[in-house]
Image: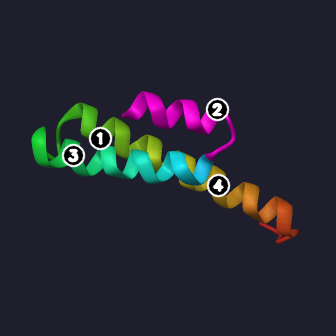
Amino acid sequence: MANLASTWKSLGCLKEALHLMRRCVEFQQQILGPDHPRTVSTFSKVRRWEVASRRSHDETTGIPE
């Protein structure tokens, strides 16, 4: 599922990619636990993508940082 999200992101579908990665985090938290390295890594990736998404939005709307 994370691989599909990464592919969507590389194709420019960041909104869909973020949605899917958030689902990955939910599943990983349930199955692996919130402190598992894979869960933490996926959560970190979601946060980085969210920051990138906000920056992209700000650049397209002309909102200063």
Q: CA distance from mark 2 to mark 1?
A: 22 Å
Nearest to the eye among marks 2 and 1: give it: 2
The residue at which mark 1 appears reads as 40
The residue at which mark 4 appears reads as 53
Secondary structure beneath dot 4 equals: helix
Q: Position of residue 20 (x, y in %)?
A: 42, 47
Q: Position of residue 60 (x, y in %)?
A: 84, 61
Q: Position of residue 62 (x, y in %)?
A: 88, 69
Quadrant in which the C terminus appears: bottom right
Mark 4 / mark 2, whichever is N-terminal: 2
Residue 4 part of the magenta segment = yes
Secondary structure beneath dot 3 equals: helix
Q: Is residue 48 left or right of residue 10?
A: left
Q: Is residue 61 left or right of residue 48?
A: right
Q: Answer whether labels 4 and 2 touch (C-beta < 8 Å).
A: no
Nearest to the eye among marks 1 and 3: give it: 3
Query: What kind of residue is marked 3?
Result: Phe
The residue at which mark 3 appears reads as 27
> What residue do we see at 36% from left, 39% from top?
42
Mark 4 / mark 3, whichever is N-terminal: 3
Secondary structure beneath dot 1 equals: helix
Q: Is residue 35 left or right of residue 40?
A: left
Mark 3 / mark 2, whichever is N-terminal: 2
Q: CA distance from mark 1 to mark 4?
A: 20 Å
> What residue do we see at 13% from left, 48% from top?
30
Total residue callouts: 4
Q: CA distance from mark 1 to mark 3?
A: 12 Å
Secondary structure beneath dot 2 equals: helix
The residue at which mark 2 appears reads as 10
Query: What kind of residue is marked 1?
Result: Val
